Structures are given as structure tokens and as C-alpha cells.
Image (cartoon, helix red, strand yellow):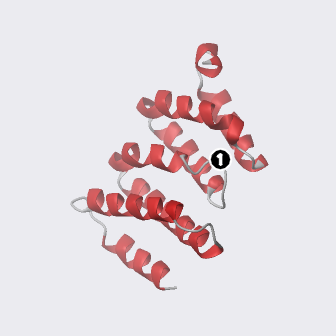
């Protein structure tokens, strides 16, 4: 697939100077997949994009804040939901400053999650990192 090869080349060429631009482009592409038809090709491309964003965050943690909330929009349904919730788990673990906002959005999205694997990880994140009952009840 041409998209896979293009993303592979882009990930090999990413540097500290261009990471913001690459991540912004990946975010735009993710949004485009949401607007398109919900077919198998779109789902595979979205999964490739999520994996590419994850690779960027692993290499350059400073971009985590700019992508985590966008990716959380895909946590409720779809083929990438499991990948996204595992990515969110890593973000919450590695970036304590992002926990309050990520946890708040995650708690809001729990009623809409349909996949049992995703709900399992989401509830684990909430149980592990929520520090008071008000943040769960709110």
C-alpha cells in the first residue's frame, strides 16, 4: 500500500525540527478519515495514522499534548479504539500534567464505549489514576 510506504518514509525522516509539522499533517489526515465513508480502507488508513502519531510521541514526547485529545475522539468505537485507549494509557502514565484533562474526557466517554477491551482498559486507567471520587462522579 502506498500510504503505508509513505508513512514509513516520513517516520524515518522525522526530526526535532519538523515533528510539529508532521504531527499537524497526521492530525489533519486523521480528521479526513473521520469525514470519509466508514469503509475498511478508511479504517486501515486511520489505524496507520494512529500508529504513526504514536511513533512520533514515543520519539518526541513534547508533542503528546497536541494529539492526545484528538485521538480520544476515536476511543468510543471503531477499529482503532483499542490502539487509542492503550496510547492514552501510556500518555497518562508518562505525563502526569496531562492526567486531569485526559481523565475528565475519558470519564465523559465511558458511557459511549462499546468494545469490551476498550472499556476494560478505560476503567483500569480511571481506577489507577483518578485521585478523588469527585473527578469520577463529575
Can you name the residue that lies furthest to the bottom here?
1
1 vs 37, nearest the viewer: 37
Is residue 51 visible to us here? no
**Crowd around label 1: few <14 · some 14–19 · many ≥20 (10 Å):** many
Relative to 94, is 60 on the left or the right? left
Seen in the picture, residue 56 relative to 4 is either above or below; the reply is above
Residue furthest left as drawn = 17
Q: Nearer the viewer, residue 71 or 14?
A: 71
Front residue of 72 and 121: 72
The answer, for residue 27, to whether it is visible in the render is yes
- In this image, 74 relative to 9: left or right? right
User: In percent of the image, x 49 and y 27: which residue is there?
Assistant: 100
What residue is at 33 percent from the left and 46 percent from the top?
62
Left/right of residue 100 with respect to residue 23 in the rendered view: right
Up-down: is 71 above or below 134?
below
Report the front residue among 41 and 83: 41
Instruction: In the rendered view, tell whether residue 2 sits above or below residue 86.
Output: below
Q: Is residue 115 left or right of residue 42?
A: right
Q: Position of residue 82 (x, y in %)?
A: 66, 54
> Mark 1 sits on what residue?
76
Residue positioned 35% across, 49% down in the render: 63
Give residue 79's quadrant in the image.
bottom right
x and y percent of residue 111 in the render? 71, 35
Identify the image quadrant of the C terminus: top right
Residue 134: quarter of image: top right
The residue positioned farthest toward the right in the image shown: 116
Residue 13 appears at what percent x and percent y? 31, 73
Residue 85 image offset from top left, x and y in percent: 61, 47
Q: Quadrant of residue 119?
A: top right
Q: Secondary structure at mark 1?
A: loop
Amino acid at each position: 500500500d502506498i500510504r503505508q510506504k509513505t508513512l514509513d518514509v516520513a517516520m524515518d525522516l522525522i526530526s526535532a525540527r519538523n515533528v510539529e509539522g508532521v504531527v499537524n499533517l497526521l492530525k489533519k489526515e486523521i480528521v479526513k478519515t473521520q469525514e470519509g465513508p466508514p469503509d475498511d480502507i478508511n479504517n486501515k488508513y486511520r489505524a496507520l495514522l494512529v500508529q504513526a502519531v504514536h511513533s512520533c510521541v514515543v520519539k518526541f514526547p513534547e508533542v503528546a499534548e497536541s494529539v492526545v485529545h484528538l485521538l480520544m475522539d476515536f476511543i468510543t468505537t471503531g477499529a482503532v479504539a483499542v490502539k487509542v485507549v492503550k496510547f492514552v494509557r501510556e500518555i497518562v502514565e508518562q505525563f502526569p500534567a496531562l492526567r486531569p484533562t485526559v481523565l475528565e474526557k475519558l470519564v465523559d466517554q465511558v458511557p459511549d464505549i462499546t468494545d469490551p477491551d476498550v472499556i476494560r482498559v478505560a476503567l483500569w486507567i480511571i481506577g489507577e489514576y483518578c485521585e478523588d471520587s469527585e473527578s469520577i462522579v463529575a
